[in-house]
C-alpha cells in the first residue's frame, strides 16, 4: 500500500536517527591510539625529563686527589729534586815532596774542575797558608800537573794549590783550593850557597802567562837604593839560572818597568825564568825561578 507524504517524512526521519546513532556508536568505539591528538599527548607524557634530584650521584672514591692545572709548579727541593742543577764540585789532590833543587809538587783534579788561568801554589811555616798573603808561585799553563819550588833552606813548610781565576792580588783569586801538604825543604849544597848573587824571596817575585805571540813576564818592583837595571834570564835546562851566569834575554833600566815579553819562546818548550837586579857595588840580587811550558 503506497505511503502518503507524512508517512514518508516519518520514515525518512527514522532512518536519519538510526544512521546518526550508528555513526555515533562507531565513533565512540575507535581506539585512542588512532587519534593523532591522543598520540601526541602520550608521547609528551613519556618524554618528561627527570629532575636533577632524581639523578643518583656517584661519590668520589676516598683517597683520590683531583689535580688542578693552576696548582702545578716547578719541582722544589722538598720534592726530592732541586729547582736547578747544583754546580758540580771536586777537590784537588796535591802532593809535596822534598827533592833535588827544592820542593817538588804534583797534583790531579776531576774533569769537572777547570783552571782558566792555571794555578797558584802558596806556602807558609804555619799549617794554614793563604793566598795572596803568603809567598806564592803562579803556574799559568792549565795543563801543568807538576812544579818544583826552588826553596832550599831546610825549613818545614805547608803548601796549598788552587785553581786561579787571573786575579793576582785578590782574596778571590782562588777558585778551588787543595788541602795543605807538608814538606821539609832540602838544604842547598855548598856549591849552590856560593852563588855570586843575593837571593830575595820578598822582592822580584816573578809570574807570567802564555800568550799567542810569546810568554809575558811580570814581577814585583825592586826597592834597592843601588838599583842599576833588571836582567831577565831564561834557560831550557838549568833549573837555577841567574845573572851573569845565564845571559839576559831582556834588560830594563827603569825601576818601575816591571814586565817584559819573551817573543822568542818556542811552542812546546819548557823554560826556567828569573829576574835579577844589577846593583852598584853589590852582587846581583835575584828572585825565585818561575817555570812554564810554552
Image (cartoon, rainbow, N blue to C red):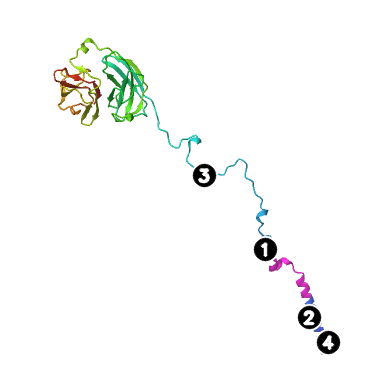
Disc number placed over residue 7 in the picture, else none: 4
Task: Report the residue that reaches farthest toward the top.
Answer: 190
* SS class, disc 1: helix
- Magenta residues, start to end: 22-41
- How many neighbours does mark 1 have within 10 angstroms: few (below 14), some (14-19), or many (20 or more)? few
Q: Is residue 38 magenta?
A: yes
Q: Which residue occupies the foreground of this view, 181 or 10?
A: 181
Dot 3: what SS?
Answer: helix
At horizontal 69% and vertical 65% (from top left) the residue drawn is: 41
Which residue is found at the position 75% from the left and 72% from the top?
Answer: 27
- 3D distance between C-alphas at marks 1 and 4: 54 Å
Q: Residue at x 77, y 71 (%)?
A: 28
- Residue 228, quarter of the rendered image: top left
Residue 291 screen position, x and y as percent: 25, 22
In this rendering, the count of numbered labels is 4
The residue most toward the bottom is 4
231 sits to left or right of 176: left
Q: Which element is circle 2 on?
A: helix
- Few, some or many C-alpha atoms within 10 Å of disc 2 (few <14, some 14-19, many ≥20)? few
- Residue 46, relative to residue 82: is it above or below? below
Label 1 vs label 2: CA separation? Answer: 40 Å
User: Would residue 163 be visible to someone looking at this image?
Assistant: yes
Q: Position of residue 237 (x, y in %)?
A: 21, 18
Q: Which marked residue is nearer to the observer: mark 1 or mark 4?
A: 1
Name the residue that disc number 2 marks: 16
What residue is pinned by disc 1?
A: 44
Upstream in sequence: badge 3 or badge 1:
1
Instruction: Reply yes or no: does residue 232 show up in magenta.
Output: no
- Mark 1 or mark 4: whose residue is earlier in sequence: 4
Q: Which residue is mark 3?
A: 71
Secondary element at tag 4: helix
Amino acid at each position: 500500500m503506497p505511503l502518503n507524504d507524512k508517512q514518508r517524512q516519518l520514515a525518512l526521519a527514522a532512518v536519519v536517527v538510526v544512521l546518526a546513532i550508528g555513526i555515533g556508536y562507531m565513533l565512540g568505539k575507535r581506539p585512542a591510539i588512532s587519534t593523532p591528538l591522543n598520540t601526541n599527548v602520550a608521547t609528551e607524557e613519556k618524554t618528561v625529563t627527570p629532575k636533577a634530584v632524581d639523578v643518583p650521584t656517584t661519590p668520589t672514591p676516598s683517597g683520590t686527589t683531583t689535580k688542578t692545572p693552576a696548582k702545578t709548579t716547578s719541582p722544589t727541593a722538598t720534592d726530592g729534586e732541586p729547582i736547578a742543577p747544583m754546580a758540580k764540585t771536586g777537590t784537588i789532590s796535591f802532593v809535596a815532596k822534598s827533592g833535588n833543587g827544592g820542593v817538588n809538587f804534583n797534583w790531579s783534579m776531576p774533569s769537572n774542575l777547570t783552571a782558566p788561568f792555571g794555578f797558584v801554589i802558596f806556602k807558609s811555616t804555619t799549617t794554614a797558608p793563604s793566598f795572596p798573603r803568603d809567598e806564592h808561585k803562579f803556574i799559568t799553563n792549565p795543563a801543568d800537573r807538576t812544579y818544583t819550588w826552588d826553596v832550599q833552606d831546610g825549613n818545614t813548610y805547608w803548601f796549598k794549590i788552587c785553581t786561579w781565576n787571573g786575579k793576582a792580588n785578590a782574596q778571590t783569586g782562588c777558585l778551588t783550593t787543595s788541602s795543605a801538604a807538608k814538606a821539609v825543604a832540602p838544604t842547598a849544597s855548598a856549591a849552590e850557597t856560593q852563588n855570586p848573587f843575593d837571593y830575595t824571596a820578598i822582592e822580584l817575585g816573578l809570574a807570567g802567562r802564555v800568550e799567542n805571540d810569546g810568554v809575558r813576564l811580570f814581577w814585583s818592583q825592586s826597592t834597592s837604593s843601588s838599583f842599576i837595571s833588571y836582567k831577565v834570564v831564561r834557560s831550557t835546562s838549568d833549573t837555577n839560572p841567574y845573572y851573569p851566569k845565564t845571559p839576559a834575554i831582556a834588560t830594563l833600566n827603569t825601576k818601575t818597568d816591571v814586565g817584559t815579553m819573551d817573543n822568542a819562546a818556542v811552542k812546546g818548550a819548557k823554560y826556567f825564568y828569573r829576574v835579577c837586579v844589577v846593583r852598584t857595588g853589590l852582587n846581583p840580587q835575584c828572585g825565585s825561578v818561575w817555570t812554564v811550558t810554552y
